[in-house]
Image (cartoon, rainbow, N blue to C red):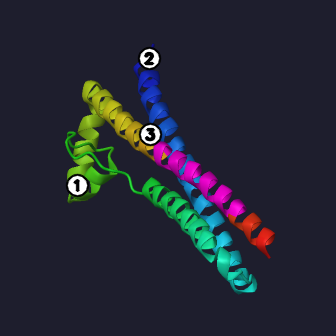
Amino acid sequence: MKTGSIISNYWDLIEYNVHHIRHSELKASLILTAYGIIFGLAYDVSGNFPMPEKYKYVLYTLIIIFIGFTLTSIFYSFKTYIPRINHKLKKSVFFFHDVNFHYKKPETYSKELIRVMENEKELKELLAEQAYINGVIASDKYVNVSKSIKFMIYSFCSLVVLLVFEFLVM
């Protein structure tokens, strides 16, 4: 197998992880958009439902449950956008954080990048480490967006119960 194809496999793995990162962020964006629509509708109709006095505590409890699930879902959606960066790994010419904070001058970065690209062993090590970093970030984002979806489902179920309760007691 040629060296170029081996190195392209590293790049393919990195791109695969980046795809999952983007996919998780897209899901989180859609969740936040859905909540924006729900809050807009709730604001428009919030004053139109009279509630008998004897059921107000049940209504408040259902609203608190809905808000709790909603805020938890939104929390995990926002957490999807904020990756934790591992500072314990060696500096890499491929890691955006290191490029920004470790290589202060373009000339320094260019020389180091050229040196790494000419050293096949070090190039493979840094690409493997970058694939690892992206894999960890993709995994964290996937876990967070999955939790957000789970709590969104709970939130919507509690909203349905809330709306059914409203219509039954009217």
Give the CA separation, mark 3 to mark 1.
34 Å
Segment tinted magenta in the rendering: 142-161
Q: Position of residue 165 (x, y in %)?
A: 73, 66
**Residue drawn where x is 20% and y is 52% of the image:** 108
Residue 15 appears in the figure: yes
Q: Residues within 10 Å of mark 2 (few under 14, many from 20)?
A: few
Q: Which residue is mark 1?
A: 107
* Of the image marks 3 and 1, the number of the one nearer the N terminus: 1
Question: Looking at the rendered structure, which numbered label has been put on residue 2?
Answer: 2
Q: CA distance from mark 1 to mark 2?
A: 31 Å
Q: Quadrant of residue 37?
A: bottom right
Instruction: Give the left or right position of residue 57, taking residue 77 as reference.
Output: right
Q: Position of residue 50 (x, y in %)?
A: 74, 84
| Residue 147 against residue 90 in the figure, above or below | below
Q: Quadrant of the N terminus?
A: top left
Mark 2 vs 3, N-terminal side: 2
Residue 139 has which mark? 3
Seen as rendered, the residue at the extreme bottom is: 47
Q: Who's the residue at 53% across and 42% down the image? A: 20
